[in-house]
Amino acid sequence: MTESLSNVARRKTEELILQGALAVGTKITERDLAERLGMSRAPVREAIRELISVGLLEQISARQIVVRRLELSEIREIFEIREMLEARAASLASIRISNEQYNALEELHLKMLKAAAVSPPDYFELNITFHSMIHEIANAPRLATLIDHVMRESLLFRSRGLVDEANIRSSIEEHEQLLKAIRLHDAELASLLMGRHIQGGFRRLELI
């Protein structure tokens, strides 16, 4: 199936936000964004509406839309929701994972180890993929949709916790423990470790 132009515009805008090219507080106009993306204004207009609905953009007046700035209380709530949802996904994944899927997850982890030594931005991207792979292995589409929604909001800040060497090391260690639990098909432990990992992610933001 061909991706719609509005989805392309939305995905590209999310990438700009994720990369910091559109910083928090940046004013967004339909015309400027269309020029930046090299697209017509109609799909960009739809993408802007969708990004407002998921909380990445905020309409603060009839003519002013900005990249949303989250309050500490909102960030904490996002992580609390992620903790509940992703812990459940890890639990299900540990039960349903196949040997082939586990090998793919472990291979991704090894790529993350290499990236951590040379390129924190690449580690950050692979970290997103690592979590997404667990959500996919859980084979719970509605749960995955809920996680995807809340993680879209966290595009606004989630890279900042993985730029420090010590933080990356902690993240890697947590992933390794989680992988062991998943390999053992220990649903309770996988849930517990994923919950702790998400809690650690909040602490690594160093917001308080």
Image: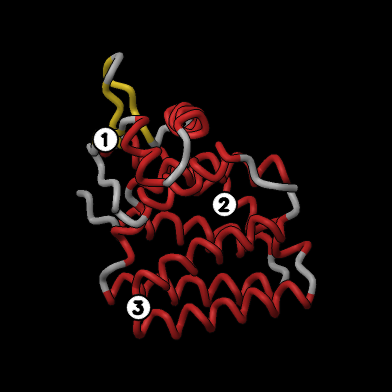
- Can residue 73 be seen in the rendering of this structure? no
Foreground residue, 15 or 102? 15
Check the image and name the residue furthest to the top.
Answer: 62
| Amino acid at the residue labelled 3 | Ser
Q: Residues under labels 2 and 1: Cα distance?
A: 22 Å
**Upstream in sequence: badge 3 or badge 2:** 2
User: Where is 2 relative to 43, above or below?
Assistant: below
Look at the numbered discs 2 and 1 and tell me whether their residues touch, using CB distance below 8 Å.
no
Residue, x 36% and y 39% (percent of image)? Answer: 33
Secondary structure under the numbered disc 3 in the rendered image: loop
Residue, x 36% and y 33% (percent of image)? Answer: 57
Disc 2 designates what residue? 86
Disc 3 designates what residue? 119
Q: Residues under labels 1 and 3: Cα distance?
A: 29 Å
| Amino acid at the residue labelled 1 | Glu
Foreground label between 1 and 3: 3
Foreground residue, 71 or 87? 71
Foreground residue, 16 or 185? 16
Q: Residues within 10 Å of mark 1 (few under 14, many from 20)?
A: few
User: Where is 205 relative to 62, above or below?
Assistant: below
Secondary structure under the numbered disc 2 in the rendered image: helix
Disc 1 designates what residue? 71
